[in-house]
Each structure stands twice: as structure tokens, then as C-alpha cells.
Amino acid sequence: MALHPYDLYDVRSLLSEEERAVQDTVARFTDERVLPIIGDAFDQGRFPKELIPEIAELGLLGSSLPEEYGGGGLNSVSYGLICQELERGDSGIRSFVSVQSSLCMYPIFAYGSEEQKKRWLPDMAAGKVIGCFGLTEAHGGSDPANMKTNARKDGGDWVLNGSKMWITNGNVADIAIVWAQTDDGIQGFVVEKGMAGFAAQEIKHKMSLRASVTSSLFFDNVRVPEANRLPNVKGLKGPLGCLTQARYGITWGPIGAAVACLDEALNYSKERILFDRPVAATQSAQLKLADMARRITMAQLLVVQLGRLKDAGKMAPTQVSLAKWNNCRMAIDIARQCRDLLGGAGITTEHVAIRHALNLESVITYEGTETVHQLVVGRELTGINAF
């Protein structure tokens, strides 16, 4: 029996019936709703926000959170498969869902009060309230402890000053989960659109994640009520805990991008005739295609085991770093190689490879650069912090 070209080890057989159903549902959404419009959206630098109601209706926002708060109650492997199939469409679509689910809904669920959970989470799951996550600052990058944004207590409110950079969803968000230095350590605040002194400015001229909204956030004496402070966490463990959740999804997402590129290059190489034979009939092309399939297979096995560890409560941040490092590198290398196999045609967004290659330049950078994750693994091995 012939093996599936994008699942040579039959990883799908390791999935439960529910997990396969989730993957099939999101794959169908990507095929029918995302792929027909995403090339044009990328060209135009436009986030297709008309997809938000459908994404919410499918239960993809907060899919792993309890149903009592509007979530889907799905396990971690199902969430990973959601990310994989969405990123097969475009990293920008997956980024939107990752930020909403892992960076905005998760901290409210994990660190918020019961009142905050009831106030925000159901509407966020329904796509009625969109969130963004304010941690990164222009001067800070990979060093979040070097945070300048600050909040000081003033009566029953907090007064917030500072700025954040490279914020996905910033200009479409109704709320921002903002992390700031206080006299009692780093704390999180839910800042609402329309609060006096709060402004978002979209970042233009991007050559990556063009079908995604990326913004700068500015806080000029923004008064935030105590009721909007996340009460159940202090210190960097708060935002870093959120990043672990989001990075987990990113370990799955690039597999979808890589599969999309391999699918296109494989089909194209069979159809393109050079020197009286298909490109796929050459040894050089077959070596490249085989290596892509090898690397995708390794990544698939890595994330399924990571998901099982997460669902068992045994996942360590270092394991997430290893998977993000491996799978982002795998995907960006494959996207570039597929672009090469497509020849001149590969530079246009009529084909997917260049779009995924450009998007993955951001994915391999955000939420921990490749170097950061290598150093995390190195620290685990040696016990020595080399940051």
C-alpha cells in the first residue's frame, strides 16, 4: 500500500477519532475559506477579518479552555492540529488564533479573577472581543526583564506609561493584555480600547506576515481600574507562562506551512518538463523532495509526543524550545527549497512557497528567536546560563 507523501510514518493513526475530526474540520475551512483569498490578502497587506466569525463559530478561539467560559474543552493535540491546518493556509491566520487563545484568553483564565473570566472569556471565544498581548518593547526584544513600561498605583486605579512593539492584532483588538513594571514586580493589566491615553499604531512596510495586523501600542498616563489587574500572578512567570502556551502552538504551525510548500513543489515538479523529462525525474529534485519529507516526518513525531506530554501535565519549557527551534528551522528551509524548485514562478504569490518563506522569517523570530531556544536547550544540558 502506498504511503501518504506528507505522512510517511502514518502519524495520523496515533490520533484519536476526535483529534482527526478536529484536523479534518480545520483543514476543510482552510481549503474552502482561507486559500482562495489569502494570496490577495497578502499582496494587499490586509488581514481578512471577515473570517473571524467563522473561526469563532468553529470553536477555534480558546479551544482548550473549559466550556463554561466559552472554550471548546479540547486537548492539547487538538489545539496543535488546529494551528497546523491554519498555518497551512497562512501564518497570519494561525497567529491571530494563537494570540487570541494562548496569549489573551489563557492569561485571563490562568491569572484572572472569576469576575474577569466571566466578563471577557465567553465574548472572546465568540469573536466579539479581540485581544492582543503587550510584552515586547522596542529596546527589549529577547530580554523581557528589561521592561520600561510601568504602572503605579493611584487611589483605586493604576496609571500606565510606556510602549510595546510588534504586537499582533494591535489595531483590531478591543483589549490588550499589557505587562508592566510595578513597585511589586511585573504585573498584567487588561487595557481596554478607548481608555484615555491608549493608542495603537499599525506597522506598515512589512515583507512578512502581511495578512496579519502588527502594531505598536502607546500608553500615556492611562488610568486602568484595579478590577482590570490580573490578580493571580506576579513577576516574569506570568508572561513567560503565556509564551509557553503560544510557543507550543507554534511548534505545530510550521508543519502546515511546510506541507503546503512540499505539496506544491511535488505537483509542480511532476508537471514541469525540462530537457524532455519532468523535473521530478531528476535525482537532484528527488533528493530535495525526500529530504523535505524526512524533516516533516521528524517534526510530526516530535509534536505529537510533545502534545501527549502537555496533556499529561509533564511538558517542560525546554521541550517546547527544542520543538520550536527544530520545526521553524525545518519549515523555513523547506519553503526556501520549494521556492527554488519552482524556478522563476516561485517568486510570485500565485504560488505559496515565497509567501510561507517570508512569513516564516517572522515565525522563527517571534516568541523566542532560534538562538534563544538553542540557548535554552544548552542551559538544560550544561546547567549553565549563557544568556
Image: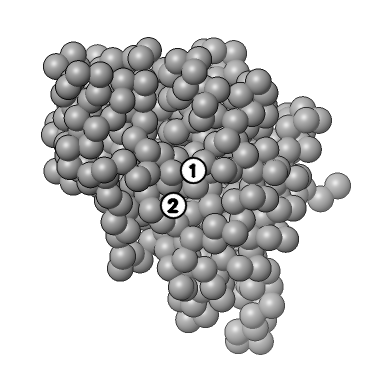
Residue 172 is tagged as 2
CB under 8 Å between callouts 1 and 2?
Answer: yes
The amino acid marked with disc number 2 is Val
Secondary structure state at the residue bearing disc 2 = helix
10 Å crowding of disc 2: few (<14), some (14-19), many (20+): some
Q: Is residue 59 left or right of residue 62?
A: right
Residue 299, horizontal then vertical, whole percent: 54, 39
Secondary structure state at the residue bearing disc 1 = loop
Task: Identify which residue, 127 or 269, lies in the foreground.
Answer: 127
Quadrant holding the C terminus:
top left
Q: Which residue is mark 1?
A: 130
Residue 73, horizontal then vertical, whole percent: 67, 24
47 to 112, vertically: above or below = below
| Image quarter of residue 18 | top right
Q: Is residue 321 left or right of residue 135?
A: right
View extreme (bottom): residue = 276
In this rendering, does residue 301 appear at all? no
Dot 1 or dot 2: first in sequence order is: 1
